Image (cartoon, rainbow, N blue to C red):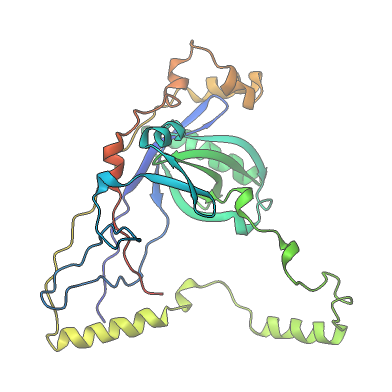
């Protein structure tokens, strides 16, 4: 079967984890690899890639990028138009910092809040203080809830110790999670839900019989396997076409540095955790360096970084 090599991990973001006065220089790497199948649009006459046009939905005519403005609907048929400058002014400041705001019990965040995982690795002599945070979280049974800005977008995130490393999992905001209240769910009380002890016992036995250790390799994407087998047969039959794809765009990255660990821990404890970072004065330029906003990207650069979405298999 045709296979594709998993690309080497690429640094997606550089900055620092910050708690109290302690900064840990780190880099983020995607913790997932997309092995889905992309069905690109091709012109069947020439096998050229098919792009997208900006169409006026009323007239059906193509329009140029400079003729497009951005609007937000606030009621049926009514829009508020915002300029690129107004939108840019609302972007959160890019601090290149994973700012831990609090530590909560490791099992205190419902899984529905978890959105996207990133591996966190130390850089620039940050291994020791990285290990300190990892071990402290493991021993305390807690995780760090933080804010981070990635590509002008602010995220809520949780920093979790996993084996030898740390994982930063982006979280959904509380307002994005629907309540159970509107769903027709049975009572949490087994008797009120109409369940008998015999039914519960039999269901428990069935669960025990079907139980095993988690093995992700035991589960396969059958659709992908079928498509790849079909592709193999077409390749063997010589039914291939040459299509040139565009090169990926590399994003810029920032950096951060680290000060003496013992000194910063002592000062953080004296000042009281959260207040330490807020009260830190100009006498500690090094500790504040990672908080300085990076230069904001030009609007034109942001625009060119956006690409047309690719149609993926369902």
Q: Position of residue 64 (x, y in %)?
A: 23, 50
Relative to 83, does residue 268 appear above or below in the rendering?
Answer: above
Relative to 222, does residue 292 appear above or below in the rendering?
Answer: above
Which is nearer the eye, 76 or 151? 76
Q: Position of residue 267 (x, y in %)?
A: 59, 19
Q: Residue furthest top?
A: 283
Q: Residue furthest front?
A: 59
| Quadrant of the image containing the C terminus | bottom left
Q: Residue furthest right?
A: 191
Left or right, 163 with reference to 13: right
Q: Is residue 304 visible?
A: no
Q: Position of residue 244 (x, y in %)?
A: 14, 64
| Quadrant of the image containing the N terminus | bottom left
Q: Residue at x 55, y 16 (%)?
A: 280
Q: How many marks?
A: 0
Left or right, 9 with reference to 105: left
Q: Is residue 195 visible?
A: yes
Which is nearer the eye, 73 or 227? 73
Relative to 287, does residue 16 appear above or below in the rendering?
Answer: below
Q: Find residue 239 and report its image quarter.
A: bottom left
Q: Residue at x 61, y 46 (%)?
A: 138
Q: Position of residue 143 (x, y in %)?
A: 61, 45
Q: Residue at x 67, y 53 (%)?
A: 107
Q: Residue at x 27, y 39 (%)?
A: 301
Q: Find residue 32 and report its image quarter.
A: bottom left
């Amino acid at each position: 079967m045709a296979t594709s090599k998993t690309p080497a991990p690429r640094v997606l973001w550089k900055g620092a984890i910050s708690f109290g006065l302690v900064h840990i220089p780190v880099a983020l790497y995607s913790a997932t690899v997309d092995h889905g199948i992309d069905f690109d649009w091709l012109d069947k006459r020439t096998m050229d890639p098919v792009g997208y046009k900006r169409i006026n939905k009323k007239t059906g005519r193509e329009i140029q990028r400079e003729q497009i403005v951005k609007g937000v609907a606030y009621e049926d048929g009514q829009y508020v138009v915002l300029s690129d400058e107004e939108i840019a002014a609302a972007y959160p400041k890019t601090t290149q910092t994973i700012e831990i705001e609090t530590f909560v019990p490791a099992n205190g965040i419902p899984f529905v809040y978890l959105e996207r995982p990133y591996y966190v690795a130390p850089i620039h002599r940050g291994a020791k203080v990285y290990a300190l945070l990892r071990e402290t979280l493991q021993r305390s049974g807690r995780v760090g809830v933080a804010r981070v800005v990635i590509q002008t977008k602010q995220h809520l995130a949780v920093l979790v110790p996993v084996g030898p490393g740390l994982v930063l999992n982006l979280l959904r905001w509380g307002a994005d999670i629907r309540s159970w209240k509107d769903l027709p769910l049975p009572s949490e009380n087994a008797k009120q839900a109409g369940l008998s002890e015999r039914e519960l016992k039999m269901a428990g036995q069935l669960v025990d019989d079907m139980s095993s250790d988690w093995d992700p390799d035991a589960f396969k994407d059958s659709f992908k396997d079928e498509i790849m087998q079909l592709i193999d047969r077409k390749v063997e039959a010589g039914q291939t076409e040459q299509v040139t794809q565009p090169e990926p765009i590399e994003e810029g990255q920032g950096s951060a540095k680290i000060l003496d660990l013992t000194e910063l821990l002592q000062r953080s404890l004296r000042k009281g955790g959260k207040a330490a970072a807020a009260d830190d004065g100009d006498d500690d330029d090094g500790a504040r360096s990672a908080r300085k906003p990076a230069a904001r990207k030009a609007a034109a650069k942001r625009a060119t970084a956006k690409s047309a979405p690719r149609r993926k298999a369902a």
